[in-house]
Amino acid sequence: MTATTESVRTPSAEFWRKFKHQKVALIAGVFVALLVLVAVFAPWIVPYDAENFFDYDKLNARPSREHWFGVDALGRDIFSRILMGARISLAAGFVSVAIGAFIGTILGLLAGYFEGWWDRVIMRICDVLFAFPGILLAIGVVAILGGGMINVIFAVAIFSIPTFARLVRGTALSLKHLTFVEAARSLGATDATLVWRHIFPGTVSAVIVYFSLRIGTSIITAASLSFLGMGAQPPTPEWGAMLDAARSEMLTAPHAAIFPALAIFLTVLAFNLLGDGLRDALDPRLERR
Amino acid sequence: MLGYIAKRLLGLLPTLVIVGLLVFLFVHLLPGDPARLAAGPDATPETVDLVRRDLGLDRSLPEQFARFVAGVVRFDFGNSIRTKRPVATEIADRFMPTFWLTVWSMAWSVTFGMAIGIISAVYRNRAPDRIGMALAVSGISFPAFALGMVLMQLFSVQLGWLPTVGNDSWRHYILPSLTLGAAVAAIMARFTRSSFVDILGDDYIRTARAKGLDERHVVIKHGLRNALIPVVTMMGLQFGFLLGGSIVVEKVFNWPGLGRLLVDAVDMRDYPVIQALVLLFSLEFILINLVVDVLYGLINPAIRYK
């Protein structure tokens, strides 16, 4: 019993050991954390009401000390709208991917563990979902259910499902024949125990990496749908919808377009950099590089 | 090889049937009565009934599906509610602008993406790699519609070098295809890099170097060929991304293509057009993936016998 705490390498300690060397991903992580704080507390920190404050004397005014990001064509404070927009974009990205990951992981575990009919049916569903280019599927859902942010979240969730299902199925297939699973089985463990206690934990790291990378994609898709006029409706301060509104004012008020564009870019960039860092720290295949 | 293609085609059938069924059911999933939608808001009940019988909406669902499939095979999707013209004509008018836009985007994004990927892999962890990968991660993080607006503002409005909207000459294609291709180029660069890094560590590359071959020969002749296999697959998947992305980019540049047609159709609840376009987009996507599978079999014979 001479083992010191340093020689014990739990998976989380091992992860942190690798992750803390990735400065870019660390900074991205801090940025994401700040964004989440801003999104949560936005209603209390915005200088002006994002939807109902109109400064008619300053239509399309450039950024100033009073209005940090300037004023839009209707006299609303762009800085306040960006902050409130963070709530919408983060919620859309996070909730849709969470739903997709949850359903996809369960389907993937079922397909990978039981194989046979489960596998065939689930993979066929995934093939069909994959047969529609992502945003097209979302547009189809919106065409049926109508516009609005809730339907957009639902639409984006649907096309996240097959990605997670395939990913988890692949991992589950490779894990189920490993010795520790066979050993547990020979001890009389039930299917449920094998799946949840022994196979599911092995898929978590891959799911976390995809989760982070998918959030970026989902934020872009949700913003794209709003830009097309199918998502958030005016006066909601959604970043994509703000860009669409700024389109006609590009000559007189380019700042009305630049700040929402920057907001989407930086947010998605942070999630992508964080996802890259997580992958490098969690993916054992990359160790030799 | 023919047997392999036949097997892949057969494997597609169930997917095709389900996709067709979903697109067919789409009309019945819409809230409200499809006959009333087609007849228009001001139609009398008699007209709605007439339209219902005219469109065959009074028949049983299986019968309607059979008629739908028979129509699709003859490229007959009915008439657009908005323009009253046949949907097939509407689509034919809009097909080529979108086709060329996607082809140009693909061409340059593959060229630039692979070049950046290869350079990054060869100069791994040095300045060219860092710059290339910073560009790439920015490329996948910048939404196409925002990029399009920025490019248009810069090159068309401020500098006046390129036209803003429309598709009258080759110069009109430059900005939209750059906008559409940027994300794909970024994904290709990242993917090519990781595929190349894997391969450059392999034994036969070391052997090639040990033989005294110059580095360019090693990278291009030995590396590129093997690194291409996963890259080709990725290309096929990205085509779907381009098809979807074109919907957004066409709105920014007011492009008279299929994407704009779809957005307008969703706005106007012009469901025959939506139906036909969703079917067309997914068919294209399925076909491209089939072509990729076949290419894959050509490049890597081991796949064919699995």
Image (tube, rainbow, N blue to C red):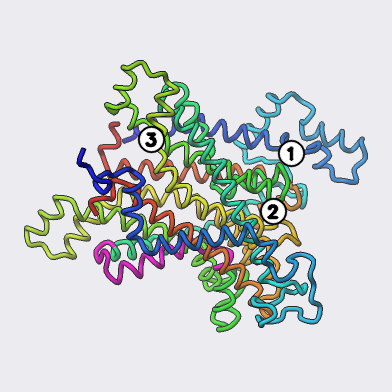
Residue A4, position as x, y percentages in the image: 24, 45
Task: Please name the amino acid that badge 2 sits on.
Answer: Met
Q: Is residue B9 left or right of residue A149?
A: left
Cβ–Cβ under 8 Å for marks 1 and 2:
no
Q: Secondary structure at mark 1?
A: loop
Q: Main secondary structure of the magenta part?
A: helix
Q: Chain of mark 2?
A: A
Q: Secondary structure at mark 3?
A: helix
| Location of mark 3 (residue) | A170
Stretch of the chain drawn in magenta: B121-147
Please check whether the numbered discs 3 and 2 fall on a single chain: yes
Task: Please name the amino acid that badge 3 sits on.
Answer: Gly
Whole-angstrom CA distance, mark 1 to mark 2, is 16 Å
Q: Chain of mark 1?
A: B
Q: Is residue A106 left or right of residue A8?
A: right
Q: Is residue B274 left or right of residue A157?
A: right
Whole-angstrom CA distance, mark 3 to mark 1, is 36 Å
Q: Residue furthest left?
A: B211
Of residues A163 and B107, the one drawn nearer to the viewer in this rendering: A163
Local packing at callout 3 (Cα closer than 10 Å; few below 14, some 14-19, many 20+) is: some
| Location of mark 2 (residue) | A230
